[in-house]
Amino acid sequence: MIGITNTSRNTNFDVQVVHRAVSITLKAHGAEACEVSVLLTDDADIRQLNRDYRGIDAPTDVLAFAMREGEEGHVNPHLLGDLVISLETAARQATTNDALSQTGGNLETEAALLAVHGMLHLLGYDHQTPKDATVMFEKQKTIFSLLEKPKHYCP
């Protein structure tokens, strides 16, 4: 199950774009039975979460809260975790030169990329070392390319 809540000021955002990105990432990992919650929010809210949980007093693009980690990680194996995406940061990033090469300056595409990135963190990937980063970003690129296929396509 994928639950998405949009508390951002961008009420016209098509949440199905993020739903599809999460769904395709789950399917690519054989994890369709997992539960994921996604919160689409603004910079003020994600800044508070980033400060409270990571000790960084600044907004960020995506936060991933994995439920399979720690002492209680085994309690509900179908509960994968929570993603928080700032649509405000995503909109800014979509217009930067680096983002343009991947997302074409489109907010929905940038948010989909952030959803894939966050999902990979929930699935256990990270980019702390150069080797891990190579693996994670190659996986991200592969899954992101699946999003460019027609909507009826399922990997």
Image: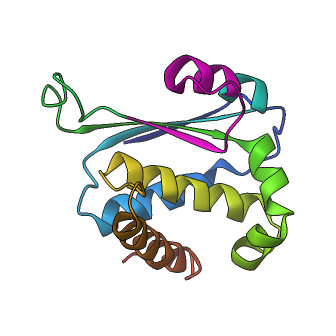
Task: Please state the horizontal and vertical placement of residue 85, each as a whole percent of the image.
Answer: 63, 41
Q: Does residue 3 show up?
A: yes
Q: Residue at x 53, y 73 (%)?
A: 144
Q: Quadrant of the C terminus?
A: bottom left
Task: Please state the horizontal and vertical placement of residue 61, each as a whole percent of the image.
Answer: 66, 45
Horizontal side of 47 relative to 112 (left or right) equals right
Task: Please state the horizontal and vertical placement of residue 145, each as a whole percent of the image.
Answer: 53, 80
Q: Quadrant of the N terminus?
A: top left
Q: Is residue 56 magenta?
A: yes
Per the rendered image, the range of residues in magenta is 47-65
Q: Is residue 119 magenta?
A: no
Front in this rendered view, residue 86 or 11: 86
Task: Please state the horizontal and vertical placement of residue 58, each as a whole percent of the image.
Answer: 72, 30
Horizontal side of 104 relative to 143 (left or right) equals right
Q: Residue at x 31, y 51 (%)?
A: 123
Residue 6, image quadrant: top right
32 over 122 or under it: above or below: below
Horizontal side of 20 relative to 48 (left or right) equals left
Front in this rendered view, residue 89 or 13: 89
